[in-house]
Image: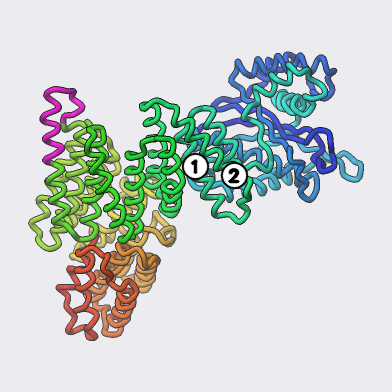
Amino acid sequence: MRKVEIWLDESGNFNDENNNRVPSLVGGVVLKGRPFTEICAREILGTTKPLHAAELYEKDLETLVNTAIDKMNSLGIIPIVFENRERVSIIDPQTTYLSVFAEGIMQLISDLNLDEDNLIFDLYIARRMYKKDMILTRMKDEEYISRLMERISLLKIKNPNLNKFNNYKINIQIGSAREDRRLMVADLVCHAWYSKRYKLSQKSQDKLERILEGKVYTILEPGGIASIKQKIKLKALGEGLFEWIGHYHELKQSNNGTKENTSKLLSLKDSLNSKLEKLNRSEKNMQLNILANYIKALVNYNKQFDLAIPYLKIFFEEIVPSLNDKNVDTLRIEAEAHFSLLTTAANLGNVSLVNKEINELELLIRNLSKRWENLDFISEYYIRKGAYLYSVHDYKNSIILMDKLEEMVSGIAEISSSILTDEFKTGGGTINSILLGKVYGVRSQAYLRLSMEDVNYLTKAEQDCYKALKQFDAESDKTRQFQTLAQINSRKKMYLLAEKYIAESIQLPKQASSEAIVKKILLLPLQQQSFIWMHYLAILAESMINGEVIFASERFELIKKSIDIHMFDNNTYPNNIILFNYAICQIYIGEYNQGISNFEKAIKISFNNIENVLMINLGLSTIAKFLIVLNKNNKLTDKTLNSYIKVVTTILKRIDNNDEFPEGIKNRLSMWDSITKNKQLKSLDFNTLKLLSEDF
């Protein structure tokens, strides 16, 4: 994580409500990616002696301000000011100071954190002195830090960009502006801005205001306003538009969305669109692509599906019409946004929204297909559609679609590679190879799921996985194929080989031990860990079901010692699958009650959102498989069977198998009829139950 140093002091008494002179402020300097040294501070101050700006004669102050500005400019040191321009009074001067400080810091971080993620902000603050009962008092360092962090934490809640998208850390240290020359530089910035009107000439004031342009933050201005203005000045219009959507969403969600703030944001939208209109076609497309990438990152990287729908709604209702008014062609970015919405809807299992977005995209593609440069998007769309088709049990149409895409991409590669460049050939991570690899990847999943009906399809699934691996260079692309190969070999009851593919999916050699695999998984980010645990535990559960208890129990005990299963209790996929397979393993090693408890958690997650039809279907499949497991372990009774049939019946009534469901889902749900009508274990249709259980 890259460090950002912020050195801050203050000017004024923060009792500004009745002060007609100059508002109080916090100010200082920012350094990105490098430390602020004492040597550098002495160079700016031009002296090795202690210096306090308020004690300088006006002429000396003006000279120092001008030379310091030049030196800070040349050294890449950024001055900043947090000003109580609105003269807000919050309880007392102490609390007012803390509020001005916290608001300024969060606005500054909002600006800095848009450029890059994972920043560490090291704050160095001059000790706070204030008058209490006419006596000059120093705030204790511990109290100072605690109260500042409290104010910062409250402000984080209201800032969507900082609270949801970016990872950052704040550290605070307290120092003395009488002893530390770096804080003396901060003091100089503070006092220069605080006293500019009555101690500096107009020329020096102008110079000071130029270097601080866009870096003066006020307590009542929303953090996004200053940031969006800065994006406009920098012509970072794609970023600005995405940030505008975020702040507009926040404004609509809050109860204090004043007319003034709404007006400011709408004015900024007009400014962004006007600037975009003036760009040439290439620059315009670049900025729109940046906006599209931010929207895609919201869905694909950050997995913020709950935010994606309102953000995209604002995009279609506010951004697209205003861009069209400026004669900006939004066809491609509209398609990108609909594609993101399709991805979001598929992940949320919102079948109605998926169908709507597929219809929208089919219409847009008619126009997009007239341009060669849109071929990549069109291919990506059909790959996504193919993945959706197999997720709703329409395996054969998914395969047919991928067959057509394979023919198209291979044909383009064959023609274009002979007359253009090697980038159009297949194999080795080139343009066409990545598309082709995805085609094989989707088709292998469709074949794998089709193998539930006919085991011979496993061979085709395996062949497509190997084909996909030949096309990919990036390890992230290969990971999914190794995981699919692990699934395939687990289905073939070759559990040791399945484990070897788990090892390869996390960039370990095939011969890696179980201990090495577990250690490597624990080093991965939590979200990535979850998907690996899902696949690994599925292999162990399957091996136990099929009699390989010794193989699985040794590995399961190792996993039990390494993870806290409660970390997977929250209502998200794939936690339900992790808990489910963990529960199966527990039952086979004799931990029956704990296994039942984790299974109950798994189905609770699956049925948490009744609108998520795909997750509901997955939850029903886990019940089917669990009934089979209980029966194999002589734990299934008529009473237990009826209790779970009651759960299934309740769920089926709630989702009401409506007309918008794809045929595959309808057929799947209708298969439960023969199970739910049964009240006795001896007449339970285990063949149908087995078909219903094979869904992941």
Residue 504 makes an appearance in the image? no
Which SS class for mark 2?
helix
Residue range corresponding to the magenta coloring:
407-425
What's the magenta bit mostly, secondary-structure-wise?
helix
User: In the figure, is residue 38 to the left or right of 669?
Assistant: right
Q: Quadrant of the C terminus?
A: bottom left
Q: What residue would you read off at disc 1?
A: 166
Q: Position of residue 668 (x, y in %)?
A: 21, 68
Residue 154 drawn above or below residue 294: below
Tell which of 594 and 413 is nearer to you: 413
Task: Residue 263: give its label.
Answer: 2
Q: Is residue 679 visible?
A: yes
Amino acid bearing label 2:
Ser
Q: Is residue 40 left or right of residue 380?
A: right
To which quarter of the image does residue 551 belong? bottom left
Q: Which mark is residue 41?
A: none
Residue at the (22%, 46%) spot, across then down: 382
Q: Earlier in the sequence, mark 1 or mark 2?
A: 1
Q: Residue at x 44, y 58 (%)?
A: 567
Q: Would residue 424 be counted in the magenta stretch? A: yes
Mark 2: few, some, or many residues within 10 Å (few <14, many ≥20)? few
Question: Dividing the picture into quarters, in which one does residue 429 lie?
Answer: top left
Give the foreground label among 1 and 2. Answer: 2
What residue type is disc 1 on? Asn
All told, the count of numbered labels is: 2
Percent of width and height locating residue 150: 66, 49
**x and y percentages locating residue 477 in the rendered image:** 26, 40
563 left or right of 653? right
Instruction: Measuring from the top left, give residue 297's x and y in whole percent.
Output: 39, 42
289 or 215: nearer the viewer: 289
